């Protein structure tokens, strides 16, 4: 397939990754100080009359002014819409007033919605953009590390219901992603580490050299090294973008991005999606378990689980279910976790999908894990 050329990078020290989806290709601009230059990138990306920024209360306090002032100067802005911070905003209860607020601000088919925030805002505002007037343009301006390397790229949007997470949603690719690395300076360290777990995941699933680079540079990145941050974000976006370009709707290869997530989602469900266990922390434990299971099944040489968990531990991420005792809920029962795993969207015909590894940087998708092997692993782990 032929990639449509996408507009030039904004210059300066920024980097640009292109998501190649023919007519729907879009750039991801990564760099410092981009919020204050958003209008020029927006102008290049589309001929929109009005842009409505959607954000959460925390991000509004910290970063809305820089973006809104720049858009207003370019006569693009309408009043922003601010929703409460937190996962509970990914709900029908918040979606309805958000859609109405966008209509009240006069957002039409030729206008754009700008999602300024973490994955919660990206998913909620992205979903709203996809259904408003049967679909308006979406610009993602991710402000968490997780959103900059993962949720702002690839077009998945959605909300949660009492039945589960992300069960209602759409595919709606953004037209532009602006990842301003300066916004990460205000992010709590624990949120930063949780996003870092997804960066490690990219190395582990497809690029051993990148994982080795992270072993060397991960701590500096977390402590604020701007160059290391920008490089890791670029590398992660490039890997996600390559996979999405090949398999936009997850009929195959895109599932590799779920390395660590079959276990991770079950742990999050067990923890009740509370602040006790962040998604990235659950993924860190899940990645460890995927390596352990791969070694136990003889699919991966010995020692890899040790190397992977040593790095995750070194940056302060949890790597074993046993560590969950510290969050005050005790430790899950293997049967509970298996029940949660069976509710995953990726279960087909009662068979679980796992992403396992042949080595660091070499993951594959399988439906052939025997339930007894899974039970054995979990009963060792849940102690
Ligand atoms: P989040 O959006 O809730 O942000 C975490 C917290 O950080 C919030 O309290 C937020 O207000 C605050 N915050 C955001 N930016 C900040 C900043 N720069 N400084 C200080 N505080 C800031 O959570 P998240 O981890 O970014 O995203 C998690 C969500 O993303 C989940 O709902 C998950 O399902 C979704 N997700 C979606 C995809 C996808 O492909 N669509 C992929 C991964 C995750
Ligand atoms: Mg994830």
Image: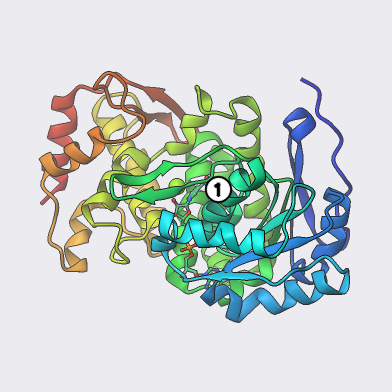
Q: Which of the pair 348/13 is nearer the observer?
A: 348
**266 to 226, vertically: above or below:** above
Other residues around mark 1 within 10 Å, as few (<14) / some (14–19) / many (≥20): many
Mark 1, residue position = 127
Beta carbon at label 1 within 8 Å of ligand 1: no
Q: Which of the pair 322/69 is nearer the observer?
A: 69
**191 to 269, vertically: above or below:** below
Q: Which residue is drawn at 36% across and 29% down?
A: 346
Q: Which residue is drawn at 74% across and 76% down?
A: 66
Q: Residue at x 65, y 33 (%)?
A: 242
Report whether 189 appears left or right of 272: right
Task: Measuring from the top left, give residue 261's x and y in whole percent.
Answer: 37, 41
Quarter containing the N terminus? top right
Q: Which residue is drawn at 39% across and 47% down?
A: 308
Colour setting: rainbow
Q: Which of the pair 137/31 is nearer the observer?
A: 137
Q: Is residue 147 visible?
A: yes
Residue 206 picture quarter? top right
Report whether 82 appears left or right of 71: left
Task: Measuring from the top left, give residue 83's x and y in whole percent.
Answer: 51, 69
**6 to 222, vertically: above or below:** above
Task: Measuring from the top left, give residue 276's x and y in whole percent.
Answer: 28, 65
Residue 167 picture quarter? top left
Residue 76 picture quarter? bottom right
Q: Is residue 120 visible?
A: no
């Amino acid at each position: 397939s032929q990639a449509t050329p996408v507009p030039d990078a904004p210059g300066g020290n920024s980097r640009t990754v292109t998501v190649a989806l023919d007519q729907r290709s879009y750039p991801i601009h990564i760099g410092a100080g981009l919020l204050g230059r958003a209008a020029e990138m927006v102008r290049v990306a589309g001929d929109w009359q009005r842009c409505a920024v959607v954000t959460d209360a925390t991000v509004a306090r910290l970063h809305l002014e820089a973006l809104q002032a720049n858009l207003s100067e370019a006569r693009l802005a309408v009043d922003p819409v601010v929703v409460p911070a937190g996962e509970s905003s990914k709900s029908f209860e918040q979606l309805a007033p958000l859609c109405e607020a966008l209509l009240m601000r006069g957002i039409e088919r030729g206008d754009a919605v700008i999602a300024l925030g973490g994955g919660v805002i990206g998913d909620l505002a992205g979903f709203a953009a996809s259904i408003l007037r049967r679909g308006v343009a979406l610009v993602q301006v991710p402000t968490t590390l997780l959103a900059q390397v993962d949720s702002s790229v690839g077009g998945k949007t959605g909300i949660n219901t009492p039945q589960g997470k992300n069960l209602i949603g759409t595919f709606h690719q953004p037209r532009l992603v602006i990842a301003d690395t300066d916004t990460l300076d205000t992010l709590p360290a624990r949120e930063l580490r949780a996003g870092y777990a997804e960066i490690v995941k990219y190395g582990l699933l497809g690029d051993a050299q990148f994982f080795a680079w992270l072993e060397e540079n991960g701590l500096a990145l977390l402590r604020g090294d701007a160059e290391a941050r920008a490089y890791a974000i670029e590398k992660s976006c490039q890997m996600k973008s390559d996979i999405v370009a090949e398999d936009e709707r997850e009929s195959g290869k895109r599932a590799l991005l779920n390395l660590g997530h079959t276990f991770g989602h079950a742990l999050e469900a067990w923890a009740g999606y509370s602040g006790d266990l962040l998604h990235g922390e659950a993924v860190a434990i899940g990645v460890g378990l995927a390596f352990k299971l791969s070694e136990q099944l003889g699919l991966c040489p010995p020692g890899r689980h040790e190397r992977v968990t040593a790095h995750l531990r070194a940056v302060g991420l949890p790597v074993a279910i046993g560590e969950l005792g510290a969050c005050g809920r005790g430790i899950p029962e293997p049967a509970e976790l298996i029940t949660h795993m069976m509710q995953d969207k990726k279960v087909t015909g009662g068979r679980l999908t796992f992403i396992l590894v042949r080595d660091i940087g070499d993951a594959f998708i399988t439906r052939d894990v025997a339930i007894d092997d899974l039970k054995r692993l979990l009963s060792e782990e849940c102690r």
